[in-house]
Image (cartoon, rainbow, N blue to C red):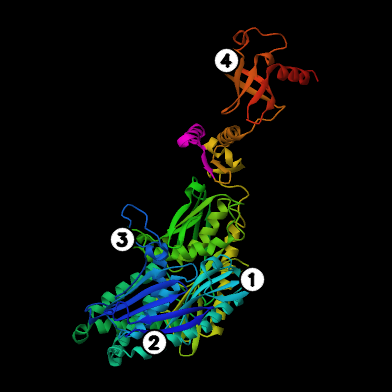
Amino acid sequence: MIKKVEVELGGRTLTFETGRIAKQADGAILVSYSDSVVLVTAVSDKKTREGLDFFPLTVEYQEKAFAAGKIPGGFFRREGRPGVDEILTCRVIDRPIRPLFPAGYRNETQIIATVMSADRAGNPDVLSLCGTSAALTISDIPFDGPIAGLRVGRIDGRLIVNPTIDEQEDCDIDLLVAARRDAIVMVEGGAKMVAEDEVLEALFFAHEAIQPILDAQEELRAAVGNPKREFVSPKLDEALVERVRGMAAPGLTEAYGNRDKLARYAALDRFKADFKAKLPADLAERGAEVAEALDKVKKEIVRGEIVNKGKRLDGRGLHDVRQISVDVGFLPRTHGSALFTRGETQAVVVTTLGTAADEQRIDALHGDFYKRFMLHYNFPPYSVGEAKMLRTPGRREVGHGALAERALKPVLPTAEVFPYTIRIVSETTESNGSSSMAAVCGGALSLMDAGVPIAAPVAGVAMGLIREGNSFTVLSDILGDEDHLGDMDFKVAGTAEGITAVQMDIKIEGLSRDVMRDALYQARESRLHVLKEMGKALPASRAEIAKHAPRIETIKIDPDKIRDVIGPGGKVIRSIVADTGCKIDVSDDGTVKIASADGAMMQKAIDIVRGLTASPEVGRIYDGKVRKIVEFGAFVEILPGTDGLLHISQIAEERVRSVSDVLKEGDQIPVKVLEVDRQGKIRLSLKEARRELNERAGA
């Protein structure tokens, strides 16, 4: 039986429907908003996968071209591997729902969100997140939901729910927020250098707007009436935990006393080997339980030192940022480079400048467009001392790169001011937490080193949180272990003026507004410290772009003359490129961009283009070339591809009997334009040109 609930949201109707499509899934929801429709299914095996120490959850999001009335490009004409936006949406769905499955649940679980219809008013990522929660909520799968998500934007100081794709371009705040009834659980988005309190206001505006979506899911669950399958999270034997604590606590405390990451990990490896060797026979038989108990003791030790003593793994205080070192311009042939090191996290970040021909063409669901700014983040295995096969970028790399790209985009100059395509690559060369924020800091420095006139330097920092009872401890610039053992990962990037990007994942319930404000302002304090350290190395963008970067000159021509620059089949423009080595981009409006690192060759290309597109001026003297001799005169080229007639009567003051007596083909002669008639025919004079040149010389 079909069940349906509706809720008004941002002036449009959000609808959840079940019982009509995909009825063999454990949970299936058709969620629609405006003309966008997404099918979300949830399936979880009835049998537990034995031998796993993690929850086997996979989330897939797929955009079907037919949803926007398109046929896919490429040879096969069908959808292929997921694009960047699809990968980012998978992450947006996965991050808030994963902590809401019961501890110890090991049943293979899969979420598939399929975009069936798409318009520019209903963002399918928001629908997919809400539909995922609804599908899990009405199913028999154990899930501590519901949750819901929406976008909050701000235009001209006014907060709005779910701005359209077109409205998002005008927003100075654009955040995707996921929340439960009593707490925000995930934030992903950006802002245009907006103050912390204003971002906080937007977050809680979103939380309030989410409540009716949660009500709708609860209503649908009651209507479906599907009971949850029985599952009881395994409880640790406290007597076992106490025995493990007694055996392990001294060794773990000593191992965690090493402030250096590699020394600490080496000490932990020695402890594990010693602990395993001394394990009594009765405990050796309970390997999985002992491992879980050991993890609990580790958390107690690390978190206890932070909460009770204010002592972190590397000896820092709660607000302290690790030591920072910066080296800019250290790669000689790149356009801009920076080596950014913060503690045991390091990134080599490089900026490359290109022309319009280097822009990335995006074949998106809502239409094709071009990107002139790209940031690519890489995380090679050596950065954490591992030896693994290099593979194509995974979801983590794509997600971190998108976050860093979002952080830097608001400070970039417009294409009119700086007509370059910009690519940043961040190679993580060492990692112990906050490598994506290292990409932000290094990215800003490499842009400035390349001479890109950014509005302001940008820095980023990752914040953490430890909750014990009702006590909350906020940590600045967290380590990898603090992220793993903590309750929050909150990345904040921005300028001295305000925030440009945020990403937050919370593993606990009930984070109050005051705690979030404290985290945001502590992040600001840390960000200003990082910006100060960056400023010591390079306070502002260099006055000139890098010497190895292409120079770009922009000239305007008559759009009707574009064909003269391109030539038949592109013959003319190819010959200019071959002759000068320049890159030349011609736009439909007559804008011509010429790029080259060689100033002389660039000027030569400019002169050729101007010559090809120039119009003859009456009264002007040109350096002409005789192209053809005829009985009544000669045809002389005064501009590339433009000839005029030099009549025999205009060759000399005296009478000329035969043109060939005076001129021959290939001669370079000065000629003056006497007339350009309505048909564009040009009348030239050699004698008038010589007379005027002689008068100038005499003067």
Nearer to the camera, 466 or 553 = 553
Point out the stretch of residues depicted in magenta.
Answer: 566-586
Marks 2 and 3 sit apart, C-alpha to C-alpha, by 49 Å
Which percent across, then down, holds residue 335?
52, 48
Q: Which residue matches tag 2?
A: 220
Please report contact status of discs 1 and 3: CB closer than 8 Å, yes or no: no
Element on which disc 3 rests? loop
Element on which disc 2 rests? helix
Q: In this view of the protein, can residue 257 be seen by the observer?
A: no
Main secondary structure of the magenta stretch: helix
Q: Which residue matches tag 4?
A: 629
For marks 2 and 4, the one nearer the N-term is 2
For marks 4 and 1, the one nearer the N-term is 1
Amino acid at pointer 1: Asp
Please report contact status of discs 2 and 3: CB closer than 8 Å, yes or no: no
Element on which disc 1 rests? loop
562 inside magenta stretch: no
Q: Which residue matches tag 3?
A: 387
The residue sitting at 50% across, 82% down in the picture is 8
Marks 2 and 1 sit apart, C-alpha to C-alpha, by 37 Å
Which percent across, then down, holds residue 262?
38, 67
Marks 4 and 1 sit apart, C-alpha to C-alpha, by 69 Å
The residue sitting at 19% across, 87% down in the picture is 282
Q: Is residue 31 left or right of residue 438?
A: left
Element on which disc 4 rests? strand
Nearer to the camera, 432 or 180 = 180
Marks 3 and 4 sit apart, C-alpha to C-alpha, by 76 Å
Q: Which residue matches tag 1?
A: 156
On-image quarter of the N terminus = bottom left
Q: Is residue 54 left or right of residue 308?
A: left
